[in-house]
Amino acid sequence: MDDLDQLEAQSIFILREAYRKLKPLAMLWSLGKDSNVMLWLARKAFLGRVPFPVMHVDTGKKFPEMYQFRDEYTKKWNLELLLGDCPPVEDIDPTLPPAARSAARKTAGLAAMIDKYKLAGVIAGIRRDEQATRAKERVFSPRGAGHKWDVRNQPPEFWDQYATPHEPGMHVRVHPLLSWREIDIWRYVEREGIPLVDLYFAKDGKRYRSLGDQDITSPVESNATTVAEVIAELETSRTSERAGRAMDHESEDAFERLRVAGYL
């Protein structure tokens, strides 16, 4: 087995463990490269069908290409899609910096969906290498009442043994891509032929490395128009994956404050 085989096998094991232990269960689908890889892995894990719903927490500010992709592949992959709206930014903590405050709308929208469907587990496509705060996560990460993340009270995970504590008012976030890197995602996309939103590929010398809301996400300079060219670019790039995310250029604690409150 090569590195991608090992990552794939680990992720499939995690997805099957989550499905066995946590009900009701749903998967977050942000329409980005990571969540599309995660969805592809779920289809592999369960013989071509996804046996739980996928959730899109919609801010109403995604790129048109993302909505088109969602509608097309919901039908192609026969997905049960749950849509949730986000509250207006005026209802969000005014002490947050502007971009973080805008992003926090998703936190509130996700919390409302978890409560509405009484979810015991939520599968999310975060990776440790993407942002320092996410490196503190567990594969099976309990969220307390009010969706709070207690970073100092996370269960140990030795030898791929995952705890799934479940008490009234809490749920578990499951992270099957936690050990993957950005370049692993792209190499897997290339190997498997996984479809992606075309904003990831360069046009007029720019492309998006990370997709979010239109008003807080910017492209980076690039001439990579194919998956192979993106991989070659990443092998030499020193630019952060989230360089185009406005939130990551605000105060140092903004991201961690969002994560503690239940951000993706």
Image (tube, grey):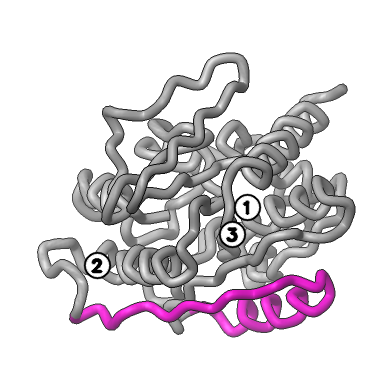
Can residue 257 be seen here? The reply is yes
Whole-percent x and y of residue 52?
68, 61
What residue is disc 2 on?
Answer: 101
Can residue 206 be seen here? The reply is no
**Quarter assignment of residue 107:** bottom left
Q: Quadrant of the C terminus?
A: bottom left
Q: Which mark is residue 55?
A: none
Report how many numbered discs are placed on residues in the image. 3
Residue at the extreme top? 159
Q: 128 and 214: which one is in front?
A: 128
Whole-percent x and y of residue 68?
68, 83
Q: Residues within 10 Å of mark 3 (few under 14, many from 20)?
A: many
Distance from disc 3 to disc 2, alpha carbons, whole Å, reads 25 Å
The earlier-in-sequence mark between 2 and 1 is 1
Question: Magenta stretch?
Answer: 62-90
Q: Is residue 151 left or right of residue 79?
A: left
Residue type at tag 3: Ala
Whole-percent x and y of residue 31?
62, 67
What residue is disc 3 on?
Answer: 26
Above or below: residue 259 compared with residue 83: above
Residue type at tag 2: Arg
Above or below: residue 92 compared with residue 122: below
Say which residue appears at 32% left-offset and 58% top-offset. Answer: 247
